[in-house]
């Protein structure tokens, strides 16, 4: 135990905190992680253990309150794809944008303000990154399902647009041989966050519904695109149509 603490202290002294957390986790030094972790929000989310609820010294996001202007700037959001924040921080920012609110008194996440269709499927916050970095089907299936669901809520003509807009703040994209499930989901999450910022931030459900463009009436010549376009439209987070 003493050796583990000394090793962790050395790692934190010579590396950034996020790197240290990753090294300690890979070494299974769970006890040495506790001083870098926070149990806030873990119990009422689907994060498997509080040892994964880690915040960096310069947190990406505050766990309390609604999303802030400063949390949604390009300069802050790009930290997700540059891997300069923890998986938990990325999750928390997405949860806040989806409408979850953390109650400091009860220690629970409140879902009253969550997009209706999303809340019906996920009454509690769901891991969108794969915070355990375990990709076997038993562990990763619910994470993959929620991540795909979030991606499908982005209109087809917006996909990839958001991440490309971050070039001016240091993100040049990933090379194919650099891709991992974690990096892919971080990029997908950032794309959704930027879409949210442009389309939903600081708007009520009523305003979102009022601004929604009615579905295009397709002619017989367009029938080849009916299935995919209809699928994306049904999964829009701002819609309240029946399944």
Image: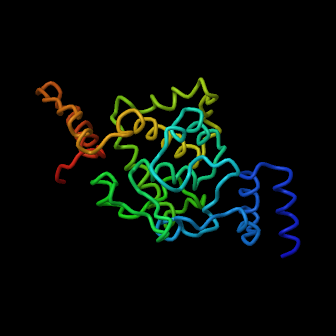
Viewer-nearest residue: 188 or 71: 71
Most extreme residue toward the bottom, as rendered? 1
Instruction: Please indicate whether residue 218 sits to the left or right of residue 205 in the image.
Output: left
Q: Quadrant of the C terminus?
A: bottom left
Q: Which scheme is used to colour this image of the protein?
A: rainbow
- Residue at 48% in and 66% down: 46
Q: Is residue 69 above or below residue 16?
A: above
Quadrant of res 133: bottom right
Residue at 82% across, 62% down = 8
At a point 29% along the width and 43% down the height, the residue shown is 204
Q: Position of residue 19 (x, y in %)?
A: 74, 51
**Residue 144 image offset from top left, x and y in percent:** 46, 55
Q: Nearer the viewer, residue 142 or 43?
A: 43
Image location (x, y in percent) of residue 157: 35, 29
Quadrant showing the N terminus: bottom right
Residue that protrudes farthest toward the front in the picture:
105
In the image, residue 59 sits, relative to residue 5, either above or below, namely above
Left or right: residue 27 versus residue 100 is right
Q: Residue at x 34, y 33 (%)?
A: 156
Instruction: Report how many numbered discs are placed on residues in the image.
Output: 0
Left or right, 120 with respect to 216, comes to: right
- Pinpoint residue 199: horizontal percent, then vertical percent: 35, 35
Relative to 103, residue 190 above or below: above
């Amino acid at each position: 135990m003493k050796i583990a603490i000394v090793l962790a202290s050395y790692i934190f002294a010579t590396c950034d905190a996020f790197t240290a957390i990753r090294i300690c986790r890979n070494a299974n030094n769970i006890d040495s992680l506790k001083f870098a972790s926070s149990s806030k929000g873990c119990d009422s989310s689907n994060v498997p253990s509080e040892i994964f609820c880690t915040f960096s010294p310069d947190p990406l996001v505050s766990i309390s309150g609604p999303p802030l202007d400063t949390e949604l700037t390009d300069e802050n959001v790009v930290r997700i794809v540059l891997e300069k924040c923890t998986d938990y921080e990325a999750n928390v920012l997405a949860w806040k944008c989806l409408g979850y609110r953390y109650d400091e008194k009860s220690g629970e996440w409140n879902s009253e303000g969550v997009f209706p269709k999303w809340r019906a499927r996920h009454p509690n916050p769901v891991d969108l990154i794969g915070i355990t970095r375990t990709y076997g089907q038993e562990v990763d299936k619910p994470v993959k399902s929620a991540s795909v669901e979030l991606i499908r809520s982005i209109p087809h003509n917006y996909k990839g647009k958001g991440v490309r807009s971050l070039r001016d703040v240091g993100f040049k994209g990933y090379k194919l041989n650099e891709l991992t499930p974690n990096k892919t989901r971080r990029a997908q999450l950032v794309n959704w966050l930027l879409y949210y910022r442009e389309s939903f931030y600081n708007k009520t459900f009523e305003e979102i519904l009022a601004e929604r463009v009615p579905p295009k009436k397709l002619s017989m010549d367009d029938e080849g695109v009916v299935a995919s376009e209809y699928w994306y439209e049904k999964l829009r987070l701002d819609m309240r149509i029946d399944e």
